[in-house]
C-alpha cells in the first residue's frame, strides 16, 4: 500500500504546515496494516485537546486524494467549518473508495453543507453521511434534500440536531418518495415551531409510497398520539420499515395502542424505540399483547422513562416469557417495584434475557431483589462503539441484537 505517512509529510512541507502528531500516528497505523481498505479515525474527542482545523483538513484531503484504499473517514468532534467542508467536498469528488464520512459535531453551516451536497450530485462512492450536531440549518438541509432528488449513491444520512425546521424535514420526506437508495435517515431534534405535526404527516405519507426505507429516526418531534396514528396507518400498509425510533416525544397509551395494532398485523418492525414518552401501565400492556403473538417480529423494545409501574411491566414480563422473538428490552426509568425486580431478575438468571440486552442489572440487599441501571440502552451503541463496523448507524441495533 502507498506510504500515506510520507505523502502526508511531503504535503505538509509543500504547504508549510506543521504535521499533526495524531494524524501521523493514524496514517502510520493504516500504512502498516495489510488490509486492502481502511478507515481513518481522527475523532477530536479521542485525543487530549488536539482537534483538527480547516487547514489540517486541507492537508489531509490532499494526502488522501486519489487514494483508492480509504473507505471511511471519521472526523467527529473537530473544528471543521465551511472552509474545511469545501476541502472534503473536493475529496468526495476525487475519491472512488470513500464510503463513510462522519462529521458529527463540527462547525459546518449552510454553505459547507451546500458544498458537500453539490459534490454528491455526481454519484460517486459515498454511502453514509453523518452531519449531526452541525448547524447547517434549513438552508443547508434543503440543499442536501435536493441532492437526494438526483439519485446519488447515498444510503444513510443523519441530519439530526442540525437546526432543521419544518420546511426541510418535509423536503426530506418528499424526496424520499422517489429516492430508491436511502435506507436510513435520522431527522431527530429539528427546530419545530408548529404543533400541527406536519413533519410526521409527511413522513407517514412517504412510508406508504416508499418501500426502501428500513430505518427512521424521529426523536424530539413533539409527536403526539395523533401523529403516531398517522404513522401507524402508513405502517399497516406493509411498509419496509424495520426500525422506528420515536424517542423523546409526547406519546401516551393511545399511541402505544396503535403501535401494538401495527405489530399485531404482521408488520416488519423489528426495533421500536419509545424511550422517554409517557405510555404508562396501559401502554405497556398494549405492547405486551403484540409481543405475545406467535408471528411477532419485534426483537427490541425500549420503554425507558415512560412512567410505567408494576401492572405494565409485569405484563411485559409475562409476554417475554411466552415464546416471543423479543431479545432486547429496556425498562430503566420506570417505577421498578419489587415484583418487577424479581421478575426481570428471573428472566436474566434463566437466560431468557441476556446481560447486555437490557438496561437493568439485578442485585440483592437484605434479601430483597433490586435493579440497578446498566449502561446498555439501544442508544449506547450509536456513538461509543466503532462507528464503521457493522454497528454503524443503520444496522446499529440490528447488528447488536442479532
Ligand atoms: C451513477 O448512476 C448511474 C445510474 O444513474 C449508474 O449507472 C452508475 O453506475 C453510477 N456511477 C457511479 C460511479 O456510482
Ligand atoms: C434517477 O432519477 C430519475 C429521475 O427521477 C429516474 O427516472 C431514474 O429512474 C433514477 N435512477 C435510478 C438508478 O434510481
Ligand atoms: C439520531 O439523532 C439523535 C439526535 O441527534 C441521536 O440522539 C440519536 O442517537 C441518533 N440515532 C442514531 C441511530 O444515530
Ligand atoms: C400485507 O402483507 C400481507 C402478508 O404478506 C398481506 O396478506 C396483506 O394483504 C398485505 N396488505 C397490504 C395492504 O398490502
Ligand atoms: C415455542 O417455540 C418452540 C420452538 O419454536 C415450539 O416448539 C413451542 O411449541 C413453542 N411454545 C409455545 C408455548 O408457543
Ligand atoms: C420510489 C419507490 O421506491 N417506489 C416504490 C414504492 O413502493 C411501491 C410499492 O412497492 C413501488 O411500486 C414503487 O416503485
Image (tube, rainbow, N blue to C red):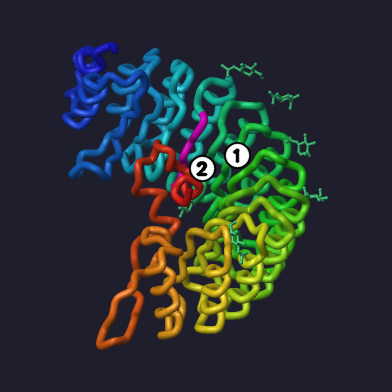
Residue 56 shown left or right of residue 383 in the figure: left
Q: Which mark is residue 32?
A: none
> Whole-Å distance between the Cαs marked 1 and 2?
8 Å
Residue 332 shown left or right of residue 256 in the figure: left
Q: Residues within 10 Å of mark 2 (few under 14, many from 20)?
A: many
Q: Is residue 370 in view?
A: yes
Membership of 182 in magenta stretch: no
Q: Residue farthest to the bottom?
A: 366
Q: Residue at x 38, y 60 (%)?
A: 376
Q: Position of residue 377 (x, y in %)?
A: 41, 60
Q: Which stretch appears magenta?
A: 127-132
Residue 390 shown left or right of residue 300 in the figure: left
The verdict on label 2 being within 8 Å of ligand 3 is yes
* CB under 8 Å between discs 1 and 2: yes
Q: Which residue is nearer to you in this view: 261 or 89?
A: 261
Disc 1 target residue: 183
Amino acid at each position: 500500500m502507498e506510504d500515506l505517512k510520507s505523502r502526508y509529510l511531503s504535503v505538509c512541507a509543500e504547504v508549510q504546515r506543521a504535521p499533526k502528531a495524531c494524524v501521523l500516528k493514524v496514517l502510520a497505523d493504516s500504512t502498516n496494516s495489510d488490509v486492502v481498505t481502511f478507515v481513518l479515525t481522527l475523532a477530536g474527542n479521542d485525543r487530549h485537546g488536539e482537534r483538527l482545523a480547516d487547514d489540517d483538513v486541507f492537508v489531509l484531503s490532499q494526502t488522501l486524494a486519489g487514494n483508492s484504499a480509504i473507505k471511511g473517514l471519521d472526523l467527529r468532534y473537530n473544528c471543521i467549518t465551511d472552509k474545511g467542508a469545501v476541502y472534503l467536498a473536493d475529496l468526495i469528488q476525487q475519491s472512488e473508495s470513500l464510503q463513510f464520512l462522519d462529521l458529527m459535531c463540527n462547525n459546518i453551516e449552510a454553505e459547507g453543507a451546500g458544498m458537500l451536497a453539490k459534490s454528491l450530485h455526481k454519484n460517486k462512492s459515498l454511502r453514509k453521511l453523518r452531519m449531526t450536531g452541525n448547524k447547517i440549518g434549513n438552508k443547508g438541509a434543503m440543499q442536501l434534500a435536493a441532492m437526494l432528488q438526483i439519485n446519488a449513491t447515498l444510503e444513510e444520512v443523519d441530519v439530526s440536531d442540525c437546526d432543521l425546521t419544518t420546511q426541510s424535514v418535509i423536503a426530506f420526506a418528499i424526496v424520499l418518495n422517489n429516492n430508491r437508495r436511502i435506507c436510513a435517515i435520522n431527522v431527530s431534534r429539528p427546530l419545530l415551531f408548529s404543533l400541527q405535526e406536519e413533519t410526521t404527516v409527511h413522513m407517514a405519507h412517504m412510508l406508504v409510497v416508499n418501500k426502501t426505507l428500513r430505518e427512521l429516526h424521529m426523536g424530539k418531534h413533539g409527536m403526539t398520539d395523533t401523529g403516531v396514528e398517522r404513522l401507524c396507518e402508513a405502517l399497516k400498509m406493509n411498509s419496509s420499515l424495520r426500525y422506528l425510533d420515536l424517542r423523546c416525544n409526547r406519546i401516551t397509551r393511545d399511541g402505544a395502542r396503535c403501535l401494538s395494532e401495527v405489530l399485531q398485523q404482521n408488520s416488519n418492525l423489528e426495533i421500536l424505540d419509545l424511550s422517554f414518552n409517557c405510555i404508562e401501565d396501559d401502554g405497556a400492556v398494549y405492547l405486551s399483547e403484540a409481543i405475545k403473538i406467535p408471528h411477532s417480529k419485534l426483537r427490541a423494545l425500549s420503554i425507558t422513562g415512560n412512567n410505567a409501574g408494576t401492572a405494565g411491566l409485569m405484563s411485559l414480563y409475562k409476554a417475554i416469557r411466552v415464546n416471543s422473538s423479543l431479545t432486547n428490552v429496556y425498562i430503566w426509568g420506570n417505577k421498578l417495584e419489587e415484583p418487577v425486580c424479581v421478575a426481570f431478575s428471573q428472566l436474566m438468571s434463566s437466560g431468557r434475557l441476556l446481560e447486555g440486552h437490557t438496561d437493568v442489572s439485578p442485585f440483592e440487599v437484605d434479601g430483597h431483589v433490586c435493579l440497578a441501571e446498566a449502561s446498555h440502552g439501544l442508544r449506547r451503541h450509536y456513538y461509543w462503539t466503532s462507528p464503521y463496523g457493522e454497528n454503524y448507524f443503520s444496522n446499529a441495533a440490528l447488528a447488536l441484537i442479532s
